[in-house]
Image: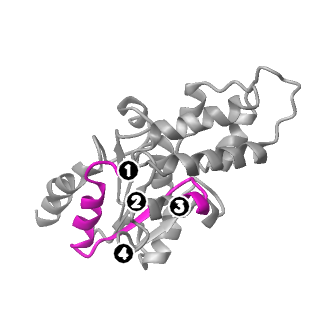
Amino acid sequence: MNLELVVFDVAGTTVAASDDVARVFREAFEARQLDLTSEAVAAVRGKSKRDAIRELVSLPTRNAHQRVDPDEIYRDFRDRLIKASASWRPVSGAQETFAWFRARDIQVALTTGFDRVVLEALLESLGWAYGVVDSALCAEDVAHGRPAPDLILRSMELCGVSDPLEVLSVGDTRADLEAAENAGVGWSIGVLSGAHSADELSLSPHSAILNSVADLPAWYRRRVISYQRS
C-alpha cells in the first residue's frame, strides 16, 4: 500500500487547544445555568461542534423547565472559541510533520468539527492559511460530521486520492478513529495530545497510538516503509 494522503484532526491533534475547547463548552452552558460535566464534554469530542451541542442539550440540566436553544448556545460557543483561538499554538512538531510528508510527495489535509469562521481564523493565526497544508475542511463542508467518514472522503476528493487504503488518518478522539474506520483508510493513528486517553482510544479500531504527531514520521518509517521494502 502506498501512502498518498495524511488527514489530520485540528484541536488536540495538531493544535494545542484541547483544554480550551472543553472550557468553552462548559462556559457556554454555564452562562445559561446548565450543568455540563467534564465527562459529558469528553464524550462528544471530535464531533461537529453544532452536533455536539445538540447532543449535550438533550442531557439533564439543573432546570428541566428552562427553554434551551442549541443554536443560541452554539453561537455563544463559537464566539468564545474564536477569542480563545487567538492564543492557540501548534502541537510541538506538527508543522515539521506536515513538511516531512509533503517533502515526500504525500499530501496533508486538515479536518475539524469547528465551523468555517473558526477554522479560517485559526489558520490565519497559526500562519497555516497558505502553503502549509493541501486542504482544510470543517464541519460545514460535509453532510455528516464524525464519526461519519465524510470529512475524510471529501479530503480525498479534493486531493485527488481515490483509494482509502492510500490514506492515513490521525486524531485525538474516538470519533476520529471511528471516522477513519468508517472511511476504510489504510492506517488510523490515535494521539495522546488531546481529549482522550490511551485507554479510551484503544476502544476504537486503530493502527497505533502515539504520544503526538511529532512521532508520526518515525512510526511511518518503522512500520510502513520497512513493510513495503520487505
Real-space Cα separation, disc 3 to disc 2, in angstroms = 9 Å
* Left or right: 229, with 193 as reference point: left
> Bounds of the magenta span?
89-118
Q: Whole-percent x and y of residue 176?
A: 47, 49
Mark drawn on residue 126: 2
Q: Mark 4 = which residue?
A: 131
For marks 4 and 3, give the CA distance: 16 Å
Labels 4, 2: front one:
2
Question: Which three-letter amino acid code belongs to the residue tagged 2?
Answer: Leu
Amino acid at the residue labelled 4: Gly
Judging depth in this view, the residue of 124 and 91 nearest the camera is: 124
Which mark is on residue 121?
A: 3
* Type of amino acid under label 1: Arg
Three-letter residue code for mark 3: Ala
Q: Nearer the viewer, residue 184 or 74?
A: 74
Q: Decide if residue 147 is in sight here.
A: no
The earlier-in-sequence mark between 1 and 3 is 1
Element at badge 2? helix
Indicate the quadrant containing the C terminus: top left, top right, bottom left or bottom right.
bottom left
Q: Residues within 10 Å of mark 3 (few under 14, many from 20)?
A: some
Q: Which mark is residue 89?
A: 1
- Residue 97 in the image: state x and y as whole percent: 26, 59
Going 57% across and 51% down the picture, which residue do you hit? 82
